[in-house]
Image (cartoon, rainbow, N blue to C red):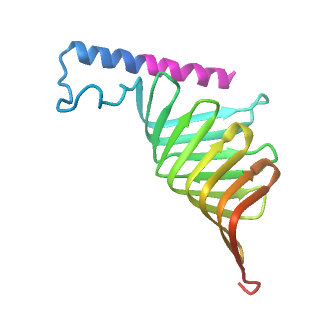
Amino acid sequence: MRRRLGLLLVPLLGALAVLATLALREAGAPSSGGSSPADAPPPRDWYAEGLGTRIHDERGRLRYRLEAARAEGWADGRSRMESPRLELHTRSGEVWKVRADAALAEGEGRLVLERRVRARRVAGGRPLRIETERLVAYPERDYAETDLPVRLTAPRMETDAVGLRAWLAHGRLELLSRVRSRHDPQR
C-alpha cells in the first residue's frame, strides 16, 4: 500500500511541477536567452529540494530509503539528484549506506551514483567500506557494479581493484581485475 502511494506521489509531484512551469511561462517569465533551442536541455517536468522517499517490501519492511538535497525529473522517468543518500536493507538483513555527489535514476530501478561514491555496510555483516567514482546500483535486486577503480576497506584489510560486482543480499563481491590487497594482522 505504501509503495503504491509512493509510486503515485511521484507523478503527482511531476504534474504539479508541470503546471507551475506552464503558469510561469504564461506570466511572461524571462527565458534563459543566448542559446539556441537545439542546444537547450529538455525542460524538466518536476523539481524538488530536500527529497526523501522510502520503499517497503510486501510485508511492510523497509527495503530502502533515498534522500537527495535536490532532484529534478523528466517525463521519460529519468531523474537527476544532488548529494544522494541511499540506505539499502537487503533481504538477508544487511544494511548498506551509500552516498555520492550526484546520481541519475533511470528506468528499470537503475541508479547511477557518480563522483566520490562511498558505500559502507553498517549492519548484518563484517564492517566494509567501498569507494569508487561511479557505481551502478539496482536497489530492488540488492546488486551493484562498477568498471572503474575501487577500494575496499575492512578491519585490518585494504584492497584495490578495477571493477566490482556485488550481490549484496548474498554477501558476495567479485573484483574484476588488477586486484591488490594488504592485510595487517596486528592492526
Q: Is residue 13 above or below residue 115?
A: above
Q: Where 121 sits versus 105, above or below? A: below
Q: Quick check: is 13 in the magenta stretch?
A: yes
Q: Is residue 11 magenta?
A: yes
Is residue 15 depicted above or below 35 in this figure? above
Residue drawn at x 60%, y 25% as measured from the top left = 6
Residue 165 is situated, as x and y percent measured from the top left of the image, at 71, 53
Q: Measured from the top left, where is residue 19 in percent x and y?
A: 36, 14
Q: Quadrant of residue 147?
A: bottom right
Q: Residue at x 59, y 52 (%)?
A: 98
By secondary structure, the bulk of the magenta-drawn segment is best described as helix
Please report the bounds of the magenta region as a residue range: 1-15
* Left or right of residue 186: residue 83: left
Residue 156, how many percent across, how many down? 72, 78
Is 132 or 51 nearer to us in this picture?
A: 132
The picture places residue 95, in percent across and down from the top left corner, at 71, 51
Give the quadrant of the N terminus. Answer: top right
